C-alpha cells in the first residue's frame, strides 16, 4: 500500500488538533484549516501545520487523506460543499460522534467509494487546539463505518491510518454505531449534565463535591454546541437509553419510599457486579 504522505485536516479542535500533532510527529505533511484564526495561527506557529488552507480549502485536493474534524451539523452541511474540491484524494473520513446520517451524506455527495466514517472513542471535556495532544489516540478505540460502496482499499487505508496512530479499530455500520453510542457515550454525557443541573439548582458548586462527584460531573463541561448536534442527530436511540435510565431511578425511588431494603440492596449490588465485570475484548491488533 502506498504510504500516506499528506493529510488535510478541516478543524483543529481537540480531535483534529491531536490528529495534526500525532501525524506531524510521524513526519506526515499536515494541511490544516480552522474557522478560528488563532487556532490555525498556533498550529502553524508550532510547526504542526505545514500548509495553511483558507476558507475555500485551497490545496485540499493534493492530500492523500482528508479528515473532517468539525461538529456533526457542520459535517453534514459541509460534506456536499467539500466533495467537488477533493480531486484524487484517496480517503475521506470524519471523526464525529454519530455516523448514520454522515455516511448517508457522503454517499449522496458522491464520495461513497472513498469515504469511511470514523469515531475515536477518546477525548476530553476540554476542547480547542490548546486541549489537543499527540498521544490522544494511544490505545484508543476507533470505530470505522464504511458506506455501502466503500472500496476495500479505502477501508484498508482507514484501518492503517488509525493503527499507525497506535489505536485499535472496530468496524460497525453507521446505524449500529449510533445505537451503541447512545448507551456508551451519549447517555453518560447527558446524565452528567443532568446531575450538574440538579446540583446547580440545589446551590451546590462543583468545587464543593468530593472526588466521586467531580468524576460524575466532568462530562458536563463539554462544549454545548457540539453536544447539541450529537444528541439531536442521535435522538431516537438516545431517547430509548434515557427511558431505560429513568426506569432505574424509579426503581430506587420507590424502594426508598417503601423502605424496601431488599430492593435497595439488590439495586446497589447489581451496579457493583457490573463494575467488576469482564472488560471488552481486544480490538484489531495495532501496528507498532
Image (cartoon, rainbow, N blue to C red):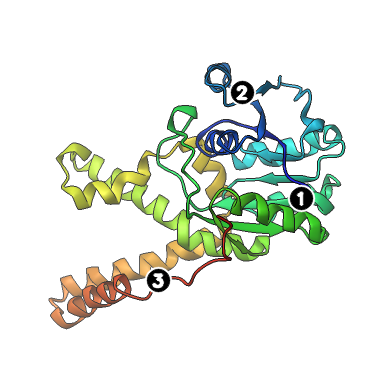
Dot 1: element:
loop
Q: Quickly name the residue at label 1.
A: 115
Quadrant of the frame with the C terminus: bottom right
Q: Position of residue 38 (x, y in %)?
A: 53, 17
Depicted 59 relative to depicted 88: above or below: above
Q: Position of residue 279 (x, y in %)?
A: 40, 71
Left or right of 44: which side holds 151?
Answer: right
Residue 150 visible here: no
Q: Quickly name the residue at label 3.
A: 279
Q: Earlier in the sequence, mark 3 or mark 1?
A: 1
Local packing at callout 2 (Cα closer than 10 Å; few below 14, some 14-19, many 20+) is: few
Q: Earlier in the sequence, mark 3 or mark 2?
A: 2
Dot 3: element:
loop
Q: Which quarter of the figure has residue 23?
A: top right
Q: Quickly name the residue at label 2.
A: 35
Dot 2: element:
loop
Question: Which numbered mark, 1 or 2, is in the foreground of this view?
Answer: 1
Q: Position of residue 32 (x, y in %)?
A: 65, 27
The residue at the point 16 percent across, 47 percent down is 210
Q: CA distance from mark 3 to mark 2?
A: 39 Å
Is 228 in front, or is 54? 54
Is 161 in front, or is 198? 161
Left or right of 86: which side holds 186?
Answer: left
Amino acid at each position: 500500500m502506498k504510504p500516506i504522505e499528506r493529510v488535510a485536516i478541516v478543524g483543529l479542535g481537540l480531535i483534529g488538533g491531536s490528529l495534526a500533532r500525532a501525524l506531524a510527529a510521524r513526519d506526515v505533511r499536515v494541511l490544516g484549516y480552522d474557522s478560528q484564526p488563532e487556532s490555525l495561527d498556533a498550529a502553524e506557529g508550532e510547526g504542526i501545520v505545514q500548509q495553511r488552507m483558507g476558507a475555500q480549502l485551497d490545496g485540499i485536493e493534493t492530500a492523500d487523506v482528508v479528515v473532517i474534524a468539525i461538529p456533526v451539523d457542520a459535517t453534514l452541511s459541509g460534506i456536499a460543499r467539500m466533495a467537488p474540491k477533493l480531486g484524487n484524494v484517496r480517503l475521506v473520513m470524519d471523526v464525529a460522534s454519530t455516523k448514520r446520517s454522515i455516511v448517508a451524506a457522503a454517499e449522496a455527495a458522491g464520495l461513497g467509494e472513498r469515504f469511511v466514517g470514523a469515531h475515536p472513542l477518546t477525548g476530553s471535556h476540554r476542547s480547542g487546539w490548546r486541549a489537543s495532544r499527540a498521544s490522544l489516540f494511544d490505545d484508543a478505540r476507533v470505530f470505522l463505518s464504511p458506506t455501502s460502496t466503500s472500496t476495500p482499499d479505502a477501508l484498508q487505508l482507514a484501518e492503517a491510518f488509525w493503527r499507525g496512530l497506535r489505536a485499535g479499530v472496530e468496524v460497525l455500520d453507521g446505524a449500529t454505531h449510533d445505537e451503541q453510542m447512545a448507551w456508551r457515550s451519549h447517555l453518560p454525557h447527558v446524565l452528567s449534565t443532568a446531575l450538574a443541573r440538579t446540583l446547580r439548582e440545589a446551590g451546590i458548586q462543583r468545587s464543593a463535591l468530593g472526588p466521586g462527584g467531580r468524576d460524575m460531573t466532568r462530562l458536563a463541561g463539554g462544549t454545548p454546541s457540539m453536544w447539541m448536534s450529537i444528541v439531536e442527530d442521535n435522538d431516537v436511540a438516545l431517547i430509548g437509553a434515557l427511558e431505560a435510565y429513568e426506569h432505574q431511578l424509579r426503581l430506587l425511588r420507590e424502594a426508598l419510599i417503601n423502605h424496601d431494603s431488599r430492593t435497595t440492596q439488590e439495586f446497589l449490588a447489581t451496579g457493583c457486579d457490573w463494575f467488576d465485570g469482564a472488560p471488552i475484548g481486544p480490538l484489531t491488533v495495532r501496528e507498532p
